[in-house]
Amino acid sequence: MTSAGQRRDLVFLPQILRQRAEAPDDTWSFVFLDSQGHEQCRQTAPDLAAKARAVAAALVRATRPGEPVLLVFQPGAEFFAAFLGCLWSGRLATPINPPRRNRLIERLVAVAADSNARVALTSADLLGSINEWRCSSERLGALDWIPIDELTDDPDLAPAATAADDIAFLQYTSGSTALPKGVRVSHGNLIEDLSRMEAVWALNTRSTLISWLPAFHDLGLIFGLLQPLFSGCASVQMAPNAFLQKPVLWLQAMTRYRGTHSAAPSFAYDLCCRRVAPEDRAGLDLGSMVMTMNAAEPINPVVMEQFIEQFQSFGFRREAFAPAYGLAESTLAVTANPVGVSPVLRHFDVDALAAGRVSIVADGAPASRAMPGSGQPLPDVPVAIVDPDTRQRREPGRVGEIWVGGPTIAHGYWQRPDETEATFGALIEGEAVAGSFLRTGDLGALVDNELFVTGRIKDLIILGGANFYPHDIERTAQNAHEALRRDNGAAFSIASDGAASEREQVILVQELERSHRADAPEPIFHAIVEAVWQNLELALSRIVLVAPGAVLRTSSGKIQRLANRKAYLDGTFAVIAQWEGHSAARPSANAGPVEASALVVWLTGWLAGRLTLPARTIGSDQGFAEMGLDSLGSTELAFALGEKVGAELPETIAFDYPTIARLVAHVAPSQKAGQGVAAIPAAVSSVPSLPGTDLDDLLASIERGDA
């Protein structure tokens, strides 16, 4: 393990790649699988080094040292070469997810503007989309877009001279489109974090890491892509959409390549439990797994237990689960559950937690909350529990804000000195000798040196591994209807009931304009739900309309989202009208004797199973967002429907055609208007909802072609 005092001796990733490429006995390899699990490409270190040098040579001609360069790629080997080419040339790699069919383009524009990048690297398969983006945005039109497919290698180009504190890349935190923040991660930060993860999770040249995580996200980039290169172990990758379409591909890759390491958010393990049919599990062998990280969103202990229970007969061991905690501002990992050790689970008294105290109770005790630990701090990574107001260290047994120090802490935000000082330069009151800390904005407690994350001070909402900022939700909702008061709403999340299929619910409390207090609420609800779903790919769970002045603020006028959350839970708001996602399902207003097509029947059954709704309540003109279909569910629907009709459908199709009627009219345009889309047949309306899950056997049978 490299300590902070040895930073001057660190060897950085471009040099590591060159060493591997020049070593005749190096066994590192990179494999990318297609959507069917077949090998799309395979690279060795010499292959990757040649492509990285070609990118570096182009950047030397087109950019200046230390200049940010946007990386806009679909998942695949090209992104890896582009990222390492930036590091090889001494430019700042800036990964960003490409918009899907011109959706969510605002984020790409915002990152391009904030980074002040002049050049964007991409691949030839995106050039058609790029032409559309350039026409729709002056900022994107001004970029010099360079496809890397045909760039020529420069074998004599050596990696740029690099120091530990030189910035390697900008990691833009996912979420807000309006206020993106690029975390400045140095070459030294990377090596320090990679070396610690290698040690705690026992990675070596005999390991094989399997990943489907997106490369523009810190977990997918650093652990999924860079860790295997650093540790010299085989890397097997697939696109996130391949996993979402067929979760079994992930498990089959672990089996075929004798995978030892992997990582995913909690929802992915839930998806495997629900969507890998019994017959698809035949032949799985997960006995080679040393660890699979559970991180990037709140860890659901019910999901962990279900995954263990369902896959232990296929060789999966409890101690292979590795809960962890980290964030982009600390490069990646802060705490980790080491290999060979079962995850820690404790039960906390909920009343004590609400009062900021830790009280461990017995399993099954009344008014208790089961929480998995997120592991112990990595070596030389101090973790402190601090009172966020007084900045004094909390005594043992108390909940406080999680502060983190050590050599993995990034160098602040790109061109944001004030926010950098506030977030990265925190000092514990009375402990100046301890140095500066990173304020994470998360609440937690240390119990026997195990970190338990209990909540968040910051307003960030994390769902499905994606971050959503409340002000984005509020702004989008308020722009949806004239009856809503601007800058007078509060979005926040509340915990679910703990069932494996349940995730956090997003609530919006919103003031009405005085002149609209008597308006019918249904059109307002519909406008809000559709706007948030279409623009942010987020399904709201509940909307509460309140009178002017009801939303709680600080004395300086800032929205107090935590206080509004408490008022909502306590039931102290004077509510004018309230909408709840699942209760909003309603019978079709156009029900009649018209015979519906098989596609309408199928879609109704699929949605009933996915959302645990009685099929009779699903109307063909009802918006998918109103039913409670979230972004992940929309992607699942696109893939399942594509299999049903035998065509490859864009994953955004449920956003572009957001009702059964519009979707059927698009997918089956030969069907006459009004035929099969106005009514739900009686046979389908008798399909019961499926309690306790949102896919279960119905969806599994649909995907097998039985329905």
Image (cartoon, helix red, strand yellow):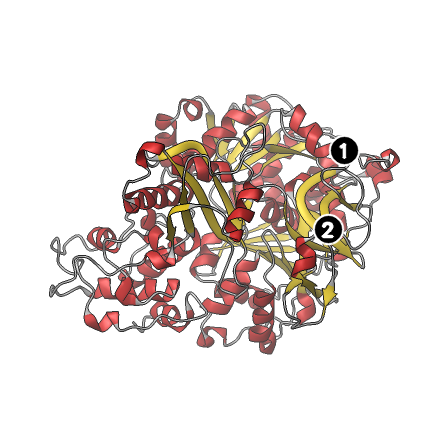
Query: Which quarter of the image is occupied by the C terminus?
Result: bottom left
Which of the two marks, 1 or 2, is nearer to us in this view? Answer: 2
Disc 1 designates what residue? 164
State the image quarter where residue 288 is shown: bottom right
| Residue receiving disc 2 | 399
Residue 268 image point, x, y percent: 53, 60
Looking at the rendering, which quadrant does residue 408 occupy?
top right
Residue 448 image position (x, y, % from top left): 81, 59
Mark 1 surroundings within 10 Å by alpha-carbon count, few (fewer than 14), some (14 through 19), many (20 or more)? some
Residue 490 in the image: above or below residue 210: above
Residue 52 seen in the current view: no
Q: Where is 417 relative to 665, above or below?
A: above
Query: In terms of secondary structure, where does tag 2 sit?
Result: loop
- Is 404 left, or right, of 677 in this rendering? right
Residue 345 appears left or right of 666? right
> Is 265 above or below relative to 367?
above
Q: CA distance from mark 1 to mark 2?
A: 35 Å
Residue 88, horizontal then vertical, whole percent = 65, 33
Q: Earlier in the sequence, mark 1 or mark 2?
A: 1
Q: Residue at x 34, y 69 (%)?
A: 702
Residue 552 in the image: x percent, y percent? 52, 38
Give the amino acid at mark 1: Ala
